[in-house]
Amino acid sequence: MDTALATEVLKEALERPEIFNSDQGSQYPNQEHTELLKDQGITISMNGKGRSINNIAIERFFRTFKCEEVYINDCQNIAGLRAGIARYMDFYNFNRFHSVRGYKKPMEVYRTTRLKVA
């Protein structure tokens, strides 16, 4: 990982967030990255070193994503990586059963919950 990739992704995401949460990996606390966040009025939140439990849900997702997509596919460039991410997100949300959701698919749970609220 490097600063350029983290900063590129950050620039794409700047339109939406009010808070940016990350770990303390070397690509995040650098001056270019933090100044970009501050200039946009975004609050910076960094988990303490070794405190992945602070963000356990997303840490677990990324572990699953890496094991089920990244490590088994030989991505040659950013375009291939983006296509792999899109493919996996579709699979994860619409086709993958989740034990924590009673072996239902996330979109199935979302739609059912949304209908009950509406």
Image (spheres, helix red, strand yellow):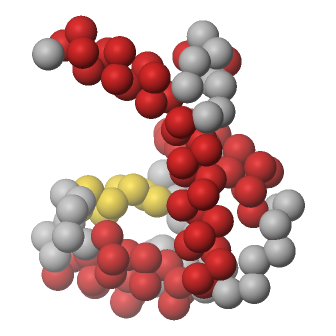
Residue 41 lies, in percent from the top left, at 14, 70
Residue 89 lies, in percent from the top left, at 55, 50
Quarter of the image for residue 75 reads bottom right
Quarter of the image for residue 2 reads bottom right
Residue drawn at (60%, 84%), measured in percent from left and top? Answer: 78
Residue drawn at (34%, 23%), measured in percent from left and top? Answer: 111
Q: Tell me if residue 59 can be seen.
A: no
Q: Tell me if residue 43 can be seen.
A: yes
Q: Is residue 68 left or right of residue 116?
A: right
Count the labels in the image.
0
Q: Is residue 112 left or right of residue 99?
A: left
Classify 105 as above or below 46.
above
Residue drawn at (74%, 57%), measured in percent from left and top? Answer: 69
Classify 4 as above or below 50.
below
Which residue is more in the foreground, 24 or 89? Answer: 89
Which residue is more in the foreground, 62 or 69? Answer: 69
Residue 106 lies, in percent from the top left, at 50, 28
Residue 17 lies, in percent from the top left, at 23, 60
Classify 44 as above or below 110.
below
